[in-house]
Amino acid sequence: MPFTLATWNINSVRLREPIVLKLLQEEAPDVLCLQECKSPVDKIPLEGFAALGYTHMIARGQKGYNGVAILSKLPIKEVGSEDFAALGHARHIAGQLENGVTIHNFYVPAGGDLPDREVNEKFGQKLDYLTEMRDWFHGAAPEKAILVGDLNIAPREDDVWDHKKLLKIVSHTPIEVEHLAQVQDAGNWVDITRQDIPEGLLYSWWSYRAKDWVAADKGRRLDHVWATGDIANAGHGSRVLRDARGWEKPSDHAPVFASFDL
């Protein structure tokens, strides 16, 4: 069953419902994983999504913050969610398609501004969250699974606009990159985006602070699509829909796509 999947930090699904609908109409992925929905589940605007064929949804939500959802044309059943680091945040939801593929949708904490857990509690929470992700996947090795989401880390030198300048900036510090690598190793995860696009600068996030984000192009690849080793070879067609960063009232993230022949 071939299918195409997209992941997108939407930065408020209600505020940006028009561009979610635009994406669904123009790109028509079979599955769309959203992060930072900033909405209780019962307030997510399902009617417009369902009218376009996205009649299945699983989600975790909370008012004004965090939140993850999976919209799908394909039947999907919820198979769990985890509150890593006991933060009480809606940051993970997992669903299973009828072909047995499990999709994990994550919104990893951003980590605040200072990469020092002694003075920045949020940075410590981010590292603890990643550590518990690692331990969880060690304890229950995933099979036939895809992990997507805003992982809030750009791991490679060519995942950021300037590696040296960002080494002490949250999202690209060596300790974060190491923690993410441990999560990846624990689940035997393969970075599908970089499997398909192995070389070159690649970004999925551009700050709102840039007056002209296109000209500055100071991006980071914070959004990821991974798959377990047993199905990684089925992944292909990865791309970042950069144009979406320039849509009306945009998110600061662009959607990341991949297709799977399973």
Image: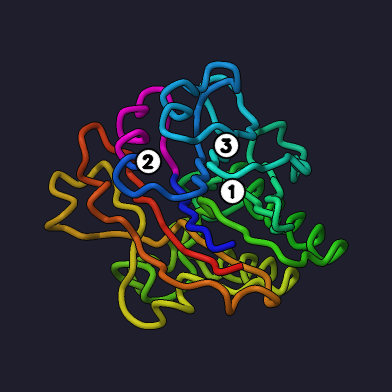
Secondary-structure class at tag 1: loop
Q: Which residue is mark 1?
A: 108
Given contact means CB atoms under 8 Å apart, are the residues at marks 1 and 2 in contact?
no
Question: Marks 2 and 3: CB-CB under 8 Å?
Answer: no
Q: Residue at x 72, y 66 (%)?
A: 144
Foreground label between 1 and 3: 3
Viewer-nearest residue: 63 or 175: 63
Is residue 17 located in the magenta-colored stretch of the structure? Answer: yes
Of badges 1 and 2, nearer the viewer stands: 2
Query: How far, Cα to Cα, is label 2 from label 3?
Result: 15 Å
The residue where tag 2 is placed is 24
Question: As shown in the figure, which amino acid type bears the numbered disc 2?
Answer: Leu
> Which numbered disc covers residue 63?
none
The amino acid marked with disc number 1 is Val
Within 10 Å of disc 1 (Cα), the crowding (few <14, some 14-19, many 20+) is many
Q: CA distance from mark 1 to mark 2?
A: 24 Å
Left or right? Give the position of 242 relative to 186. left
Residue 60 position, x and y percent, is 65, 31
Q: Secondary structure at mark 2?
A: helix
Q: Residue furthest top?
A: 43
Say above or below: 240 vs 21.
below
What x and y, as percent, mark residue 95? 69, 46
Q: Are marks 1 and 3 in contact (CB under 8 Å)?
A: no
Determine the secondary structure under disc 3: strand
247 w.r.t. 256: above or below: above
Check disc 3 and report the residue beneath it.
69
Quadrant occupied by the C terminus: bottom right
Magenta-drawn segment? 9-22
